[in-house]
């Protein structure tokens, strides 16, 4: 569940930032400057929200989310950003085009494929999302 919260939040932030930046005609750098913080905010936010629903103190929830999700979100963001920027014209195509959405979906898929084994390795070592397992 912790991995699902983190990756879902990250993907929502990615899609939101990419749609806004591309829809406004921003260049790739400006779009990614918006997208990356949104991915972190949503990724951490989903985890924090789940912990708060379990009646955890807010400070502890934030600290656990930062400790558990950071490596996962960093991995996903690096992968997603490199893939989407490597596809010529993907972001410039804008959110009303097939190229934009297929490129975004492809970049998120590759990021997910790369991030899941990273999360699994961390969990097996008692790190990353493993610190949240008792809370889900």
Image: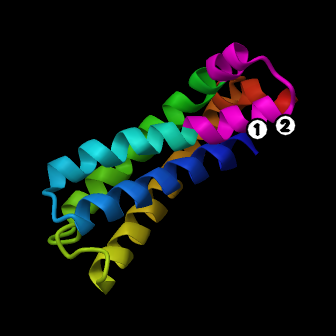
Numbered circle sitting on residue 90:
none
Secondary structure at badge 2 equals loop
* Magenta stretch, overall SS: helix
Crowd class of label 2 (few under 14; some 14 to 19; many from 20; radius 10 Å)? few
Gap between marks 2 and 1 measured at Cα: 8 Å
Dots 2 and 1: beta carbons under 8 Å?
yes
Name the mark nearer the viewer: 2 or 1.
1
Relative height, residue 20 to residue 71 (above, below): below
In the drawing, does residue 87 fall left or right of residue 98?
A: left
Relative height, residue 110 to residue 47 (above, below): below
Question: Whole-percent x and y of residue 110?
Answer: 44, 60
The residue labelled by disc 2 is: 136
- Most foreground residue, 29 or 87: 29
Viewer can see residue 79 = yes
- Which quadrant would residue 121 be assigned to in this image? top right
Question: Whole-percent x and y of residue 40?
Answer: 46, 38
Residue 45 lies in the magenta stretch = yes
Residue 90 lies in the magenta stretch = no
Furthest residue toward front? 24
The residue labelled by disc 1 is: 50
Residue at point 33% right, 72% down? Answer: 103
Crowd class of label 1 (few under 14; some 14 to 19; many from 20; radius 10 Å)? some
The range drawn in magenta is 44-64
Residue at point 17% right, 69% down? Answer: 92
Where, quadrant-wise, is the N terminus in this rendering? top right
In the drawing, does residue 119 fall left or right of residue 83?
A: right
First in sequence, mark 2 or 1: give its number.
1
- Which quadrant would residue 128 be assigned to in this image? top right
Where, quadrant-wise, is the C terminus in this rendering? top right
Residue at point 57% right, 35% down? Answer: 44
């Amino acid at each position: 569940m912790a991995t699902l919260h983190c990756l879902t939040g990250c993907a929502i932030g990615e899609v939101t930032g990419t749609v806004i930046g591309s829809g406004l005609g921003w260049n790739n750098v400006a779009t990614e400057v918006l997208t990356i913080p949104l991915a972190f905010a949503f990724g951490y936010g989903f985890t924090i929200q789940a912990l708060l629903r379990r009646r955890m103190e807010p400070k502890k929830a934030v600290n656990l989310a930062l400790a558990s999700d950071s490596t996962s979100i960093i991995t996903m963001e690096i992968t997603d950003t490199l893939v989407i920027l490597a596809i010529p014209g993907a972001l410039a195509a804008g959110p009303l085009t097939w190229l934009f959405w297929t490129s975004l979906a492809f970049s998120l898929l590759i990021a997910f494929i790369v991030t899941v084994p990273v999360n699994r390795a961390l969990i097996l070592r008692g790190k990353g999302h493993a610190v949240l397992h008792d809370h889900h």
